[in-house]
Structure formats: structure tokens, C-alpha cells
Image: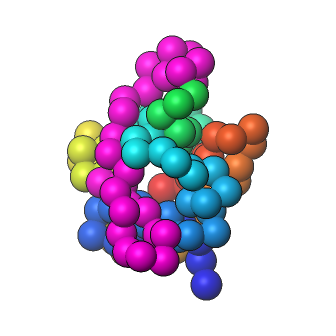
Amino acid sequence: MSVLDLKSQHIIVYQPLAEKLLAGETHVLLKYDTTEKVLLMAPASRNEFKVAHKAAQHILKERNLKGDKSISIHEILIDHELDDNDRVLSFFEQEGVIKINL
């Protein structure tokens, strides 16, 4: 099973990853890096990330009782003309920041 999917223009963060990196958070910070072609995601509590990357705050929604979360990225997909087909997303985590290949 994957831990990160794109479904209906939402990033689905499954419970294992959500619990590890987003526990207790109600919002996330997102910034699409056009140079690296990755979406940077960090908990909203990481104020230094927001300042350094000029990241936008997005709602982190509870998806189900299992602890899965979802984030709407409709605007990001449109603004950067990215593929919006449902799929498993590859990513890597570094110091609490998730770099997602879109």
C-alpha cells in the first residue's frame, strides 16, 4: 500500500505518514518548486519553512477514522499545468519536509 496518493486533485496522506509527520496539525504549508519540479509540504507549525519558501497554508482535512488526511491541490495543479490524473506519488522526507514528485 502506498502512503501518498493523488486522488481527485487531492493529496491523500495515509495514516502511517500522517502520524509520523503531521500529528496534531490542522494545516500544512505547500510550495511548488518549479526548479526541482517538486511540491514541498511541511506542517504549518514550521514557521521558518513558511518564511524561507513563501509557502501558502492549506487545510489538512481528516479523511476517515483510520487517520488518513487529505489536502486539496487543485490550484497548484492548474497554476503549474501539472498532470491531475489519480496515481501513487513518489516522495522523500528530509528534516520534516516532504518533497513530492508531481
Q: In the figure, is residue 24 to the left or right of 74? A: right
Q: Is residue 55 above or below residue 67?
A: above
Whether residue 34 appears in this view of the structure is: no
Whether residue 8 appears in this view of the structure is: yes
Q: Is residue 13 above or below residue 57?
A: below
Q: How is the image coloured?
A: rainbow
Who is closer to the viewer here, 27 or 53? 27
Q: Position of residue 28 (x, y in %)?
A: 44, 41
Q: Please report the residue visible at 32 percent of the width from the left and 51 percent of the height from the top.
A: 73
Q: Position of residue 100 (x, y in %)?
A: 56, 52
Q: In the figure, is residue 31 to the left or right of 58? A: right
The magenta segment is 47-72
Return the residue found at the far bottom.
Answer: 1
Q: Please report the residue visible at 36 percent of the width from the left and 33 percent of the height from the top.
A: 57
Q: Position of residue 52 (x, y in %)?
A: 56, 16
Tell me, yes or no, whether the highlighted magenta stretch contains residue 51: yes
Tell me, yes or no, whether the highlighted magenta stretch contains residue 41: no
Q: Please report the residue visible at 36 percent of the width from the left and 69 percent of the height from the top.
A: 63
Q: In the figure, is residue 17 to the left or right of 86? A: right
Q: Position of residue 44 (x, y in %)?
A: 48, 34
Return the residue found at the far top.
Answer: 51
Q: Please report the residue visible at 30 percent of the width from the left and 54 percent of the height from the top.
A: 72
Who is closer to the viewer here, 76 or 13? 13
Return the residue found at the far right.
Answer: 95
Q: Quadrant of the N terminus?
A: bottom right
Total marks shown come to 0
